[in-house]
Image: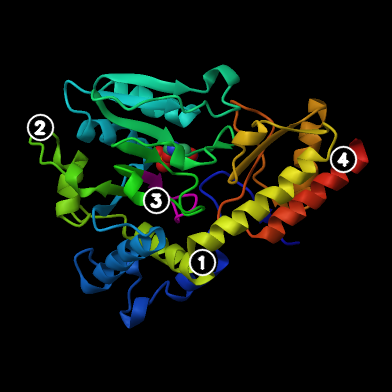
Amino acid sequence: MERIFFQPGPTTLPKEVLSRAKAEWDDFEETGLNIMEHSHRGKSYETVHDQAKERLKRLMDIPETHDVLFLQGGASLQFAMVPMNLLESGKKAKYALTGSWSEKAYKEASKIGQCEIAISGKDTQYRTMPSMDYQASDEDAYLHITSNNTIYGTQWPDLNIFSHPNLVADMSSDILSRAINVSDYALIYAGAQKNLGPSGVTAVIIRKDLLHENEKLPNILSYHIHAKNNSLYNTPPVYSIYLLNLVLQWVEEQGGVAEMEERSTKKAKTIYDVIDASSGFYKGYASLESRSLMNITFTLENSELEQQFINECEISGIFGLKGHRSVGGFRASIYNSVPLESCEKLAKFMVQFQEKYG
Ligand code: PMP
């Protein structure tokens, strides 16, 4: 039986990417070595590294004003690196709280300098994105947002509402799923393990004027040092970047970000339509206007059926749906690598489950 997967991350990689990695497993471009056995300073790896960087620039239309870095430590390290590098003394970092990850980002930054909550959706249990009634002020070092809230299944539907001279965005769970205007951002970061590839590498897109030398900062935590060394200050996660490059190539071959955006809208609709037509048998967690196109969170009206739902999913070959412990219920994560057919199968399963138990 074919199995389909909806886990929140790490997630599946496109089949074409795994096949290519398998074909090159013990002989990368007739070198007799796997790419991960190559020196990170050698020609073979250098080509992969530069290709990955150029591909991301092309796919996201990253202007000359911005640089691309490949770092380690996950998006979680960026919670600390952003304020370490961008929060000057005398200034304040402002945070939009829209879920657990933005709370974590805010708490980490508070250990480093002065921070304030600009807007918050906490009073709706993060079901709804707060209204953007915030004006940038001279005291702001930056405004930090989380474009998609992986746990609660909410997403800013329109990122153009933010206009801040130093807008910083955690795009870990929706990068490359919709077109954005990179020039609107001072910095964008994303752990790779959802839409970019495997875990182990984090993409950082930073406006070049922010790359200041800072003698007090350890080198490994300095954007300036990483940029100056083309992300080769220390040994990079060679295999993760190799796979990231293959995933980016796959996105290009599929038609780029515009195609991913169209697919995401269609895929999400397939499942939300079932929830909305279920007369309350399924309940969406996020409010309608804040629904994520990447993580679809829902519960069952009759919570006693939850285990049955998971059991029957697994019998039908459907995996990875258990919701995060803080929200409960279910979460279908439908990142770029999840095909429309998988969403259609899940939708069909949900309809049949309701027919049986509703
Ligand atoms: N931000 C968001 C929006 C996330 O979804 C995650 C992980 N799921 C993180 C940050 C943390 O990422 P990492 O585990 O790579 O540190």
Look at label 1 and name its amino acid: Leu
Residue appearing at x 36%, y 26% in the figure: 135
- Any atom of ligand 1 within 8 Å of the CB at mark 2? no
How would you rate the neighbour count of disc 1 (Cα within 10 Å): few for under 14, some for 14-19, many for 20 or more? some
Q: Count all numbered tags in the image, as a single digit.
A: 4
Residue beneath the point at 39% across and 22% down: 118
Q: Secondary structure at mark 3?
A: loop
Relative height, residue 56 to residue 122 (above, below): below
Residue stretch rendered in magenta on the structure:
189-201
| Location of residue 140 by image quarter | top left
Q: Earlier in the sequence, mark 2 or mark 3?
A: 3
Q: Residue furthest left?
A: 215
Residue 198 in the magenta stretch? The answer is yes
**Image spot of residue 26 (x, y percent):** 40, 74
Residue 47 pos. (x, y %): 27, 71
Mark 4, residue position: 354
**Dot in front, 1 or 3:** 3
- Quarter-of-image position of residue 133: top left
Between 250 and 13, the residue placed more toward the observer is 250
